[in-house]
Image (cartoon, coloured by chain):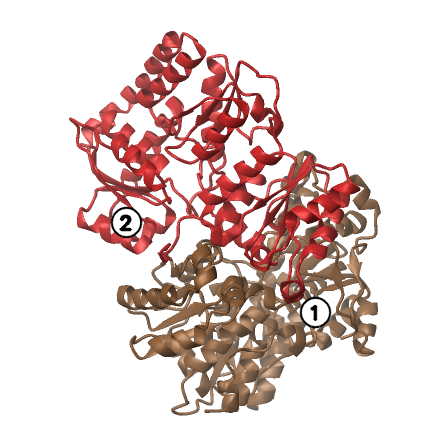
Amino acid sequence: MSLKKSINVSPIRDTRLNTIITFGGNASELVDLTSKKCLKDNSRSFTQTTFCQEWLALLTLSSIEDTVIISHAPVGCAGSLSCITIFRRYGQINRGIQPSTGTWISTNLSGEEVIHGGSSKLKDAIFKAEKRHSPKAIFVYTSCVSGIVGEDIEGVINEVQDKVSAKVLPVYCEGFKSKIWASGYDGAFHGVLNHLIEEPKEKQDNLVNVINPISFSSADEVELRRILSNLSLEANFIPNFAKIEDIAKASEAALTSSICTTFSEYFAKRLDENYGIPYTERVMPVGLDNTDAWVREIASYLGKEKEAEELIKSERDKIQPQINIIKEKLEGKTAFISAGQSRAIGVPSLLADFGMKILGVTAYHYDEVVFEGFKELEKKCGNFCINIANVQPYEQANILEKEKPDFYFGHMGESVWAVKEGFPAAMVFSLINSIVGYNGAVAFGNRILNLINNPSFSKTLSKHSKSPYSKKWFDENPFKYHKEGEKI
Amino acid sequence: MSHIIENPRFSCALGGALNTITAIDGFVPIIHGGPGCGVQVFYGQNFTSGFRGSGWIGGVAVPSSNTYEEEIVFGGESRLKEQIEKTFEIIDGDRYIVITACTSELIGDDIKGVLREVQQNNKNSIIYAETAGFKGSSYKGYEILLDAIIEQVLEVKEKNPKLVNLIGIIPSQDVFWKGNLDEIEKILNDIGLEVNTLVNGKNLEDLSSASLNIVLSPWLGIEAAKKLEDKYDIPYIVNPLPIGTQQSNEFIKRIGEFFKIDVNEYIAKKEVKTYKSIESVADFIVDMDVQPKFATITDSNYAIAINKFLVKELGWIPSTVLIIDDVPEDRKDFIKNELNFKDLPSPEVVFESDSYEIWETIEKNPPEFIFGSSLDKDFANKRNIPILTVSFPITSKVIIEKSYAGYNGSIRLIEDTLSETTVFF
């Protein structure tokens, strides 16, 4: 067993990757500060609710077959699984899998357990999960309450593991412990690495792990599988919609790649450390230039540079006529993008491929995973407004009022606020269509054409939507409530 | 000790409180707790109740102190103070409320003290409710919120002899909350009364000027009604949500009696109209032999309303009633009694919130129709049992103003129920 395996908890990104969640200014400033190592750990004096790392940890492991999630928490903490299950069912249907709502068990911690501890309920939950569903794995999620009360999750698991046939693994994701919700990915993958990945039986030269967030569609996977198979490579999409066996054999792959580098960062690095599997880390394959770069990086590790260049040329030639049609309509239109840091680079780059002008970008956080990618984006798109914010729609509302983009591109939950302000919006992901690769670029371009052809919804809705923010707020600096922190 | 729950059908206390606050015009919530609580209960209850949206200040717009390790170690009071002051600056609200999440209650922040300090320099109205998730379910959170409003907002006011309050319906936990409250309000307006539902744009302060509190639930809101009676001399009646002609008639008669309004003509008119509609679907019911054995998986409010309506008016055969809310022990007999139909077939009544146990119980006496939540769809589909989703969570349809309450609602319920039996036609 390697040294890494004996560490129970993955270190949070706050300290590990020097991640920041508060910055306001323009892209050139951010690039400059980054290169001079002058980024600061700023905070806000006014904040709106956002995601905690538990949410992202749930998102990471909620669609794996034959598993049960246990939330060692009060009953509200895993509530979002009733929403995340929409992603799961959609994804299953589109992948030809019988759709099923996942199983999650809340230990329903109450005032009594806050005082006396809840380990007996956790044991009860594990035994019931086993008896009721005979899963292959049981994920035990921690919570703020279990963390503050000091529940010994590891101890309970060690005690019961021999009595159940499922692999029981902890997912450390106490919401208060990290300001960077992406730490939740690491907490989830950490448990997977320690308990589900098996020692390689034999190395497979053509097998590439592709780490897939649940927010990418089956059409996205079809596109990446197609690209990889053109390079005579086989894609092993994990962890979402995977079988436990697919995850177990990740150690046999020749390379780890990912759709989202922010999502896969920790997992890929640990697979490398534990099993000597190199990994790609440059970009997400969203946008034509980015997809080229993604293909080239994979090829460079596997000695397929020549095939890659041929593939890129033939793919580009094939879609160019369609890109030209899209470009004709979108050239010069302005866009604002809000997304996680990797997508906040991928999507603007794709829009720039259509000739659109990037007015601004909000990235949910910013760290060394994307330093290079962001620099390249700034070079490609010129200077633009940049906000690093873990959502914070009040800042967004203010910025949009000043920037007035033609279109807004963002995630679930936040984009509706732009629409209520009158800006036509499209999601930066799709459960049905594709956005990645060459065909995804065309599909996404066509999605935007719909917004151009008919922006009525945002125009009519905004006339009837009352902003929660005071009139005065829109005259203020959008970053008024930033508080300067220590240099990181 | 509370027990573990597989696939729960409610959120936590914070969820029940927050999703009620964001349904009240001009009421600004400020969560004091971890960064993810607001989003967790938005997607864990608000959005999953038929895709209710953020509204004016819900979803990711909810002000929240987002406390981290530093506050857990050193206390979160100064962060809360700062958050409240900035919220006053930026959010244009009529009234503000701090709702505490698990972390701030576990570390013991003095919320009252912070509010006292804040109010020294500020005239904004701000109250607080201690709604830590570990205190219980959405139902508990609703009760805590009502109590906070009664204790901290209300004052003695002149009585409005025509005004009634409707309490006991939790936005989102009751997925049809808006339509239901609108429908009951309309009925009460029809007989000459004014209504404050908390969520229909009336002032919160006016709750104490009502002449009657109607608890539209077999238990939820009784505590608040008792307190309003003690403090403001407002009598109350407990009348679970009425669905269908018989329940609506009884409901209106009770209200009419209280206010000395003659409702006979109104009832007669409504009854004629409703049964004219029911008669129009009688051919379908008869021709298709629709008299199934059915089970319900809902909270106690819907359990009573749906079973009573289907058994007493449509002649369906009840099998099992699964009641998912944490009904206080002393109200269980009332509920069982409401579900005892004497000379008509009566269901077995089981109080259970764990989904696995619920399905095991149903399986023992398999029904031919299920009223449940989206969580029950796999169970029903696997057995080819038609299902109508009426209970939280609902992710398989969009709900805006739909209601099954009252006279009109019962026609909607018949339409939707029978439509589930026609999906293969």
Find out whether the residues at labels 2 and 1 contact each other: C-beta distance under 8 Å. no
For residue B247, side relative to residue A316 (left or right): left
* Label 1 sits on residue: A366
Picture coordinates of residue A98 (x, y %)?
34, 60
Tell me which chain appears red. B
Q: Which residue is drawn at 33% across and 41% down?
A: B329
Disc 2 marks a residue whose amino acid type is Ala
The quarter of the displayed image where residue A356 is located: bottom right
Q: So how many labels did they put on this image? A: 2
Query: In the displayed image of the protein, which residue is found farthest to the left?
Result: B343
* Label 2 sits on residue: B380
**Secondary structure of residue under mark 1:** loop
Q: Which residue is drawn at 69% across and 34% down?
A: B94
Picture coordinates of residue B285 (x, y %)?
23, 28
Relative to A297, is A216 above or below? Answer: above
Q: Can residue B62 be seen in this view?
A: no
Picture coordinates of residue A77 (x, y %)?
49, 57
Pick the residue in front: B270 or B121: B121
Point out the image quarter for the C terminus of chain A. bottom right
The subunit letter for the residue under badge 1 reads A
Point out the image quarter for the N terminus of chain A. bottom left
Q: Which residue is drawn at 46% across and 21% down?
A: B235
Q: How crowded is mark 1: few (under 14 residues within 10 Å), some or many (20 or more)?
A: many
Relative to B94, is A300 above or below? Answer: below
Q: How far apart are marks 2 and 1 (CA)?
A: 46 Å
Tell me which chain appears brown. A
Picture coordinates of residue A56 (x, y %)?
54, 64
Q: Can residue B244 be seen in this view?
A: yes
The subunit letter for the residue under badge 2 reads B
Pick the residue in front: A141 or A110: A110
**Secondary structure of residue under mark 2:** helix
Q: Residues within 10 Å of mark 2 (few under 14, many from 20)?
A: many
